[in-house]
Image (spheres, rainbow, N blue to C red):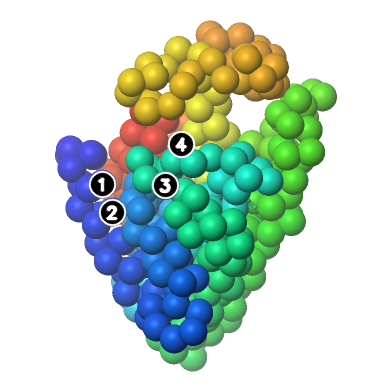
Amino acid sequence: MNIEQTLKERAKEAETTVVSYLPEVTGYPKTVLEAMEYSVEAGGKRIRPVLMREVYHMCGGTEDSLIGPFMAAIEMIHTYSLVHDDLPAMDNDEYRRGKWTTHKKYGEAMGILAGDALLNYAFETAIQAFEAASAENLAQTAEALRVLARKAGIYGMVGGQVVDVEKDGNFVDEDMLLYVYVNKTSALLESCFMIGGILAGCTADEVQTLEKSARKLGVAFQIQDDILDVIGDEQTLGKPVGSDERNEKTTYVSLHGLENAKAKVKQYTEQSIELLQAFDGEKEFLTGLMTWMIDRDK
Ligand code: GRG
């Protein structure tokens, strides 16, 4: 199977789903609605909704109308996090995905508001899954919503970002470094895997296995990011390399060296995929995509 080609097709489908749930650009708050649309439509790999749907299918889920609102919601939350991460108070970036960042195009106030609006609208969208839910999967839909809220919040992505911002990348030890990786990067991936499993009717033990698998995938993804900052090619990456060393940031590479970091990425990825062997469903593309995410050179 050609993973990149299949990802392109699935990402396009996921994008169509996400865009179909965006609010209409109309009325007095038109500017912020346009900024929301601009941020979501700016591009991106769409790996979170694609992973969510693949896990849902692997676990036996078949209702696109049930998983669709959650696929849209996770991409809206991911997009809001990038919009806010780019703000002057955080990373102060002017470009993302080759385009102006949202605050650069619409102004800082609209950047903040577009992020807020995307986060809130993500939950309004996920709640639409109740309309597709049958009597027997109402409880599963509520549980999926709970996981979405928790993993995006203070016990998930926001928590990781808080420590990252406060420490400015200078973590005191590996425990704190891993806290940031697990929360800032893994948490949303965990929610994708867990929601896919929950909506497909997995047991609590199976959902926990999915959470573990995604946690390892996220940490491997983040360590690979650290590695690329050392050995990546600026042209391919589309951003300057060596920034972690210049900013004296603690990374897995600075703590353990390049070779150990590479070995850890390999080990975590293998463990992440191994955990999925507990599931009988089709996973050739899912595991191929997981390997692709880690093997990336950009
Ligand atoms: C503002 C609460 C808040 C959180 C921000 C997402 C984030 C947390 C910061 C961005 C910096 C970063 C490197 C985060 C780790 C997660 C990550 C690798 C995000 C990029 O995800 P991709 O590669 O992006 O899926 P695309 O552009 O493809 O959607």
What residue lies at 23% left-to-right and 39% top-to-bottom? 4
Label 1 sits on a secondary structure element that is: helix
Left or right side of 194 for 44: left
- State the residue in front, 65 or 229: 229
Is the C-beta separation of discs 2 and 1 under 8 Å? yes
Q: State the image coordinates of residue 18 (x, y, percent, origin top left).
A: 36, 67
Answer yes or no: is residue 78 visible: no
- Checking the image for residue 7, the label placed there is 1
The amino acid sitting under disc 1 is Leu
225 to 165, vertically: above or below: above
181 to 18, vertically: above or below: above
* Residue corresponding to mark 2: 11
* Residue corresponding to mark 4: 274
* Residue corresponding to mark 3: 100
The amino acid sitting under disc 3 is Trp
Is the C-beta separation of discs 4 and 1 under 8 Å? no
Camera-near label (4 vs 1) is: 1
